[in-house]
Image: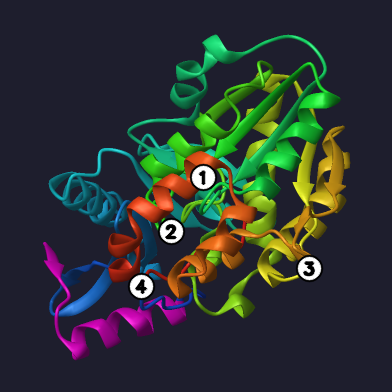
Amino acid sequence: MVSYLLTDNRIQEARNLLTDSGLDFDPDFDVFLGVYEHDSLIATGARSKNILKMVAVHPDHRDTGVFAEIINALITDAFRAGYEHTFVFTKPVYVQSFRYLNFSPLAQTDSVAVLEYGHSIKDYLKKWKSEVRSGKNSGLVMNCNPFTNGHRYLVETASACSDNVYLFVVEEDSSLIPFSARLNLVKKGVEDLANVHVIPTGPYAVSRITFPSYFLKDSEKVTSEQLRLDLSIFCEQIAPVFGITRRFAGQEPVCRLTAMYNEAMREILPQYGIEFTEIERKTAGGHIISASAVRRMLLAGEYDKLREMVPEATYKYLTENTGVLISKNATPVLSS
């Protein structure tokens, strides 16, 4: 029978089972479940929003149905919480076990694999099939928190040397500026560039699924596996559908995470036949334009400086919503 692990003692039992299974404990979870036999924990698993993780089964019970029992319980719990699309992180050796339960592989490195259940990246790509154009196509992935003149300069540069540019806006809603507003400001900011197509990333780029370290305060937790997971999804599944053979990014002299991401793209993209182009940052008033600088100016009330950094639509949004944004006082996810 599946039980919710609510006490410190029960959670410690789960930690012990994870350790014995060669897995790490992650304190970020909404629910922790366990299966007991004669008061001994024989299986465990956790859920954080729509991510299933920390799944472990005692060696003496791995050939029984307890693995399916704990996974089905986690999926049911996620569904009750409103998540019809779930993901799981696991070791590559366990991929086939999840496939038997109708999970679809999404990405994999030597150390970790991500699978999804309920929907698939094929559904996402089919949704945006109408945007596909032939030609010399480029791609950008941006958070745009908010959209600045620096972002505009980068998009203009890509637009000038591409038949089509696919601008993927990070959909993960963990930024100071809500996703719906970020997407709208990007669309307004590039509406005069006919060959630029603005598309939400869904959960498939720079999200808690593909690259969770972007959403952690401790940047030291960034791993090469997370970078490779994120970029392998882009290179193996997204880029081929949109015919993307070049990816652009702005130089990153400030944010260590984004600089590491750029370095990973420089290494990994050419392995898939995708050219990586890093563009020097645009400046205003002698300073590099960045979204983080814009946020600081907004919160400090430096509106004259702010106006130099952003398009009119962004300036209007920020000044009309200053009170809400200040009260939100969210920790920014990215510097771009």
Dot 2 and dot 1 residues touching (CB under 8 Å): yes
The alpha-carbon separation of the residues under discs 1 and 4 comes to 22 Å
The alpha-carbon separation of the residues under discs 2 and 4 comes to 19 Å
Q: Which residue is mark 3?
A: 253
Q: Can you tell which mark lies on residue 28?
A: 4
The alpha-carbon separation of the residues under discs 3 and 2 comes to 21 Å
Name the kind of residue labelled 1 in the image. Answer: Val
Q: Which residue is mark 1?
A: 170
Percent position (x, y) of residue 186?
Answer: 53, 36
Judge depth for marks 2 and 4 and give the one in front. Answer: 2
Q: Camera-side residue: 297 or 4?
A: 297
Please, what is the dominant secondary structure of the magenta stretch?
helix
Q: Which residues are magenta?
A: 1-20
Q: Residues within 10 Å of mark 2 (few under 14, many from 20)?
A: many
**Can see residue 80?**
yes
User: Taking 59 as reference, is 36 left or right?
Assistant: left
Q: Earlier in the sequence, mark 1 or mark 3?
A: 1
Image point (37%, 31%), residue name: 119
Judge depth for marks 1 and 4 and give the one in front. Answer: 1
Q: Camera-side residue: 16 or 181?
A: 181
The quarter in which the C terminus is drawn is bottom right
Q: Earlier in the sequence, mark 2 or mark 1?
A: 1
The alpha-carbon separation of the residues under discs 1 and 3 comes to 21 Å
Element type where label 4 sits in the image: loop
Name the kind of residue labelled 4 in the image. Answer: Asp
Element type where label 1 sits in the image: loop
Q: Earlier in the sequence, mark 3 or mark 2?
A: 2
Dot 1 and dot 3 residues touching (CB under 8 Å): no
Q: Is residue 146 above or below residue 203?
A: below
Q: Let me know if residue 55 is in the magenta part.
A: no
Q: Which residue is mark 2?
A: 175
